[in-house]
Image (tube, grey):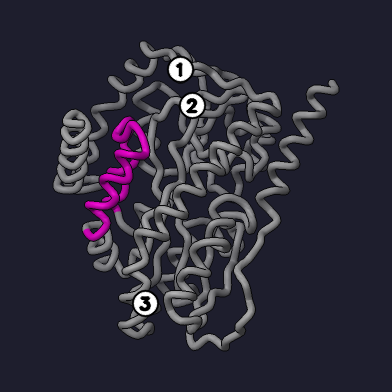
Amino acid sequence: MAAKNRCSILLVLFLLSLCFLVGPSQAKAKEPKYLFKMATLAPKGVGWARQFELIMMPKLEELAQGDIKFKAYWGGIMGDDEDIIKKMRVGQLDTAGISCQGAPMICPEFTALQLPFLFSNYEEVDYVRARMFEFFDDVCRENGFKLNFWLDQDFDQIYSSRFRFDRIEDFQRARFMTWYGELEKEVLVKLGASPIPVNVPEAASSMRQHVFDSIIAPALGILGFQGYQTMKYINPIRIRYAPALAVFTNEAWGTLPEEYQTAIMGGRAGVEIEFCEAVRIDNQKALDAMVKYGLVLVKPNPGQVEEIRRRTRPVWDELVGREYRRETLDLITGYLEDYQVTQAGK
């Protein structure tokens, strides 16, 4: 019992460490010329929201010479990603931090980045990001949005209150929360699982009520809606990479002078690197804290991983024309092949 109490204290201390922010110096106050309304699902002070407050918003304000400020609505106050995007389309919001759930709603081509086992590591992600940002930005602009930053949500893990997922039969008995849309549903069906649609704001209560017993999600997400209290197992298999986005509406972006637009996009890559490195560290800390709390970290079975890969690989081609274009998939896989060649030559 004493050990369990110590683990609980460790987890609380981790949460507290994420909640107390040290903001940038406010030595020189300046009345902003542009005030933008921003919303995100991320809870204030935790994970991605913490990096928005510490890294992204101060940097954007600096690049615009203090002439822009943000009024932020954290933690799903404006609804889930679908609600936030609808509010952006009618002018109620100007900018947003969008999760992997909402990324395809803004740019369907982002679905291709979430394909099972597409990426093996963050080095591959960074290589593709550097070469395909403008491609995704162009598609976003066609759909009414300006892509400012392509960020990381995580390489999501599999969590369950009942199953280890070190054998394929576990998938066939599991009830998975699905929240990423058609691709996630198709992947789960290929594995024989039962997908149960649940909106993100209802995830915590649905988990406590045992509406589902398993979920694919980022460590910070599980920690954020206190899933560590009901989940028992973590299988860290890198079944998918999950991107996140920071976007403006075209209209809001267009209100900024060209010099500010140029400065912001010129600083984009540096902000992305700093933001993503911080998020990756926070996700690992969250996972480690949950293991210390008592969740079991399952060692993936190589044969099982290969079987999951084999069963889910057909969705790559089956969703072409439905969720994304063949051009998008070919560009991504082509850059990944280039990356492998460069690595082999080292």
Residues drawn in magenta: 108-134
Is 146 situated above or below 21? below
User: Can the viewer see residue 145?
Assistant: no
Q: Amino acid at mark 3?
A: Trp
Q: Which residue does the image show at 58% across and 31% down from the upper left?
A: 212
Disc 1 + disc 2, Cβ < 8 Å: yes
Q: Amino acid at mark 2?
A: Pro
Q: Residue at x 48, y 57 (%)?
A: 81
Q: Are marks 1 and 3 in contact (CB under 8 Å)?
A: no
Disc with the residue nearer the chain's start (1 vs 3)? 3
SS label for mark 1: loop
Query: 98 and 219: which one is in front?
Result: 219
Q: CA distance from mark 1 to mark 3?
A: 45 Å
**In the picture provided, is 122 more to the left or to the right than 281?**
left
Residue named by callout 1: 300
At label 1, the amino acid type is Pro
In the rendered structure, which disc, 3 or 2, sits on the residue that comes first in sequence? 2
Q: CA distance from mark 1 to mark 2?
A: 7 Å
Residue 338 lies, in percent from the top left, at 16, 38
Q: Which residue is mark 3?
A: 253
